[in-house]
Amino acid sequence: MIYFDNAASGGRKPDCVQSAVCSAIKVCANPGRSGHKLALACALAVQDTRKALNDFLGGYGFDRVAFTKNCTEALNIALFGVLKKGDHVVTTPMEHNSVLRPLEALKRAGVITYDVCPISESGNVTPQAIAALVKSNTRLVAVTTASNVTGAKPPLKNIRAAIPKSVLFLCDGAQGGGHFSIDMRGAGIDLLTLAGHKGLMAIQGSGALLFSDRVNPKPLLWGGTGSVSVELDMPDFYPDALEAGTVSYPAILSLLEGVRYLTTQLSYIQERTLTLTAYLIERLGKMREYRLFSVPNESGIVAFSHARLQSEYIAGALSSRFDIAVRGGLHCAPLMHQALGTLDNGLVRVSFSHFNDEAEIDELLSALEILANEPLDLL
């Protein structure tokens, strides 16, 4: 199958990541729980991963890197663990439900209020529009690093500069992490959440929350940490306070190798995904039946619709008839589709990895041309 669904989960992993996972499965002790040599070796590898992530993303120290099972868990810790009664939040229509649903839950519980910044005609948000919604009780601004629907990339540094220094800045790195450079300190990001299994080249079950010394998230889970075991409270230091229970050593090791791979390959990956999106957009733009919602981008995302075919039908036909994997529907981002006017039929999303090539795109274009020209009674 031709795999163009990398924004949902990276389809192919570098050889170094595959080897690391296989070795971890063969010999895998519990890091941080026992004092024997194998457990200590695993604990050191976990610590190396914290350091690698912190260095790669310009973080605030390895102790402020907490591992999670995915980006959703990281976002829940960032939102439920930081916001308190009376706080106000500014966010955008570009956000995933992993941001919107926790905010809505906190709102319905009477804890917070929030406002959603409108997008511009170009399908992005502006720093001015976000700043205009900030109130005296605004505690946090939450903005994605890249839209999982269109690939649009908000101007993070400019947004940070436009809002008061006292306001915390949360960035969802699910689609940005591993696709382009992110510098937390340089961009003034206080909380960065990550999905390891997408651009960071790791496997499913890997994620992380990186946070600055301006914020001290409360835990969502309580349990064993391997530290201060005599106490019935969670540890009061990080990352232990946020990591109850056994971490997934194979997933963390895959994240370590993914970051090491990206350290040497990121420039090439950026150039390659930008080239692939431009290639598809230029050719698909010549097919009058399709409407594009993306411009060339480093996240590797191209979204489009058809004048008379639903997005989920196209995705299903590409899979069943042409052995091509894409995604159709709303992509867990309902406010973005509402803003784009695509809430009824959704969008087809093609998402590339740098492992894809132009020959695969040509097969996709041929399939889309066949679908576009078929009589309605054959569909």
Image: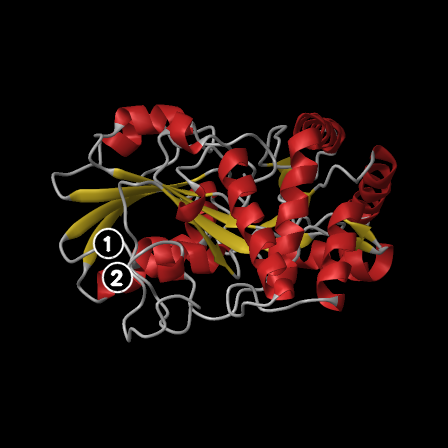
Q: Earlier in the sequence, mark 1 or mark 2?
A: 1
Q: Residues within 10 Å of mark 2 (few under 14, many from 20)?
A: some
Which tag is nearer the camera, tag 1 or tag 2? 1
Which quadrant, please, contains the C terminus? bottom right
| Residue 369 drawn at (x, y percent) | 81, 42
Tag on residue 106?
2
The secondary structure type at the circle numbered 1 is loop
Residue kind at label 1, given as amino acid type: Leu
| Residue 277 drawn at (x, y percent) | 69, 32
| Residue 180 drawn at (x, y percent) | 58, 31
The residue positioned 30% from the left and 64% from the top of the image is: 105
* Marks 1,2: beta carbons within 8 A: yes
Q: Which residue is mark 1?
A: 83
Q: Quadrant of residue 92?
A: top left
- Give the answer, above or below, for where 19 lies relative to 158: below
Residue kind at label 2, given as amino acid type: Leu
The secondary structure type at the circle numbered 2 is helix
The residue positioned 69% from the left and 50% from the top of the image is: 10
Left or right, 363 with reference to 38: right
Q: Nearer the viewer, residue 58 or 327?
A: 58
The residue positioned 54% from the left and 35% from the top of the image is: 56
Q: Quadrant of residue 292?
A: top right
